[in-house]
Amino acid sequence: MSESTITQPKTWRGTSIKDICGGKGPWSFTVTPLSPSKYHSVLYELPATLDGPPIPRVSKEPHLWHEDHVRMPFSTKNLFSVDEINIKERWKLIQDALKQPITNSKELESALKKYNRTLPNFGALHYFLHEELGEEESEQFFKNLLPNIISLALRLPELLPSGIPLLKQNHNRSLSMSQQQVSCILANAFLCTFPWKQNVAASYPGVNFVSLFSAFQREKRKDCVCEKLKCICNYFRRVTQNVPLGTITFERKFIPRSNMPRWDTLKNNLGNTRIHLDSEGTIEENGRGFLQVDFANKNIGGGVLAYGCVQEEIRFAICPELIAARLFVEQLGNGEAVIIIGTERFNSYTGYGDTFEWSGDYRDVTPRDIYGRLRTSVCVIDATMYHRPKEQFSGSQMIRELNKAYVGFHSRDPPPIAPVATGNWGCGAFRGSKQLKSLIQLIACAAAGRDMVYYSFGDTQLVEEFYYVHLFFGNNQITIAQLWRLLGQFASKNLSEDKLFSFIQQAHFESKNQPNKSIQTITKFFTKKTLDSPRSRNSSSPSKASQEKPVNNNKKEPAEIPMDLEENAVESLSPCSDDVVESSQPEESPYFKKLMVKVQSSAKKRSIEEKLPKTDLSRIFEMLDDEGNNCKETGEEHQVPLTEVIVHRSDVKQS
C-alpha cells in the first residue's frame, strides 16, 4: 500500500468543524461592532481604512497624568530627580539618553538607568545579545533594529497625544487603538520609559521589560527567556520595516454576582450544545475564527515578562500586541473577563514550557472585519489555583469558575456567534481537574448560546470520556440544573476527581430509580434581605433561558431548594443601574408560582406540607425566589457606583 493511500487515524470526536460552522467556514460568524461612546474610547480617527495607518485622535482635553488614565512618559508632570538639587522632566532625559550611540548591551543598560532610579542587572539581556545571538546578529541588532525601536518609541507624543484610559475593575469599558499605536507602546515598554509606582504595581501588572531583561536566576528557564526575546525582536523587525495598518479592541467585561445566571434553575439541555473534541491541534492555530480562550493569570499576561512559558505566556509571546494590555488592564476580579479583538500573530514556535523555542517568522492571513481588525478574538479568563485540588469541588469554587467562564463566553451580539475554542483551562500549574473544568466550560457555553471546540493537548482518554458523557447528556436530556445538582452530590463524596464522569451517570440513574431521594442542599447564602431588595420588587422581565421549560414535562416534580454555594455574594443593585448586565433571572420562579397556587388551595394544603422538607417554610420561600442570589458581595470585588454605569444585556441564550 502506498503512503498516499494510508489514512490518518481520526483524532477528534463529536460534531465536525464544518458542521459547527454551518458549512460556511469560520469567518461566517457575527462581528462585534466598534461603536465609540462614553464607555468605548477610540484613540484614532474614524473610519479606519487599510490605505494607511489610522490617524491618531487628538482630544480637546488630553489626560496625560490622570488617575483614570495611564501616566504618560512625556507628561510635563513626569519629573525625575537628577540629584538632590536638580529636577528635570523625565521625557527630556529619555530623549537625551536614547539619542546617544549604543553599541552593546552594557551601554543600553546604562542609557536606561539615566531615567530610571533603580534597575536590576540585565543578565538575561546581556546573555541573549552576546551569547545566544551570533556576532553578526548582535551587530545588526545595535546597528539597525535598536535605532528603529528608539525612533518608534520617541513618536509617543505624536501617536498617542491624548493619553490612554485605564480599564479598571468592576467597569464595562472598551478601548480601541491602531496597531501602530500599540507598537509604539511596546517600543516604550522595551526601553522601560513608563513611570511606575509600587502602589500601582499591586493591581496593574506593568509593561516595562525590565523583569524580562533581568530574568536570569533560573537556569532551566534561561533558554526559554531567550526564545521569548527572539519573538519580541522579530515583532519589532516586522513593525519597524512595514507599519501595521489594522486596529485592535480591548474590552473589559464585568457582570455582578447578582446578575449571574442561577445555575440551579437553568433548563438548557446540555446535549443541544454541539462539541468538537480533538486530542491534536492548538487553540490559536486550529481555532481560527472562534473565541479563543487564554488560560490567564488574574494579572493579564502572567509571567510573559519573566520566566513563565506555558499557554498564556506563549500566546503573548507569539502575539506580542497582547502584552500592551498589561499597561492599562487592571487585575481581574471574580466576575470579570477581557476580550481582545484584532491581535496579529508574528511568530511560529515549537515546544512548551522549558522546551519552548521560536521557530521563525509567521505570516497571519486571518481576514479583517470592516473596522480593520483581524478576525481573531482572545478571551482572557483566569482560573483559580488550588493548593489542595479537592477544594475545587466545593460549591463556592465551582460557582466561581462557572461565573468566570460565563462572563468570558457571554455575548451581546446577535446569532450566529462563534463557538468557544478552549482546552484544559486551569489544569496545569493551577491543578484543576480536567473532567470538572470541561464540564464547567460546557455549562457556560450552553448558557451563553455557544458551541464548544475543545483541544485536549494530546489527552486522548479525555476526548473519549468527555465525548461519551456528552452523549449521555443528550440521550437523557440532562439540563444545566440537573448537572449542577449532580456536581453538588459529587462534592459531598470522598471520590477521586477522575471518577466524576462515571459518578454523574450512575447518580442520575439512581435518582430515576429513587425519585424521592433527597438531594443535599446548602441554604445559608440566601437571606431574607434579598427578598426585600429593590431589585427583587422591580425586577426586569424574565430571560428566555430562565423561562425555558423542562425537557421532561410529563412528570411533576416537587419544588427543590436551590443549591447556591457562592461564599462571596454580591450586594444587589437598584434596577436603574447602567454599568451592570441585567439579571438573567425571571421575576418569579415557575416553581414558586405553582407552589403558591397549591398553598392557596385549602383542600391540598395539608398534603403539600407533608411533602415539604422538614425545615422552616419561610426559608423555603426565600430559596424559591429567583433573585435569591442578590447577596452582599465581599472579597476582591467592589460595588459599582451607580453614576459610572453602562447598560449591558446579559440574557442567557437558549440552547
Image (cartoon, grey):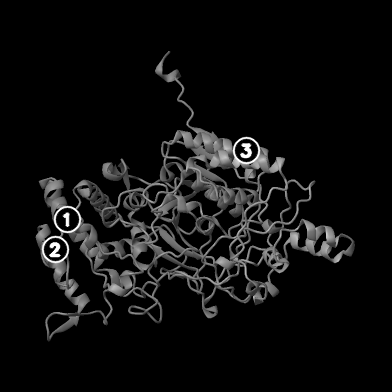
Which residue is depicted at the point 51% across and 40% down? 499
Residue 472, horizontal then vertical, whole percent: 62, 38
- Between the C-alphas of marks 1 and 2, the distance is 9 Å
Q: Which mark is residue 125?
A: 1
Residue 613, horizontal then vertical, whole percent: 71, 58
Q: Is residue 473 left or right of residue 284?
A: right
Residue 29, horizontal then vertical, whole percent: 56, 50
- Between the C-alphas of marks 3 and 1, the distance is 54 Å
Q: Quadrant of residue 120?
A: bottom left
Q: Which mark is residue 109?
A: 2
Q: Is residue 401 above or below residue 428?
A: below
Which residue is depicted at the point 62% across and 42% down? 507
- Judged from this view, the residue extending furthest toward the top is 1
Near-viewer residue (396 or 17)? 396
Label 3 Cα crowd, 10 Å radius (few <14 / some 14-19 / many 20+) = some
Residue 122, horizontal then vertical, whole percent: 15, 59
Mark 1 belongs to which amino acid? Leu
- Tell me the element at label 1: helix
Q: Which mark is residue 472?
A: 3
Looking at marks 1 and 2 on the same chain, the residue that comes earlier in the sequence is marked by: 2
Q: In the rendered image, is residue 589 in sight?
A: yes
Q: Is residue 561 left or right of residue 248?
A: right
Q: Quadrant of residue 261?
A: bottom right
Label 1 Cα crowd, 10 Å radius (few <14 / some 14-19 / many 20+) = many
Mark 2 touches mark 3? (CB < 8 Å): no
- Between the C-alphas of marks 2 and 3, the distance is 61 Å
- Tell me the element at label 2: helix
Mark 2 belongs to which amino acid? Glu
Which residue is depicted at the point 40% across and 49% down? 431
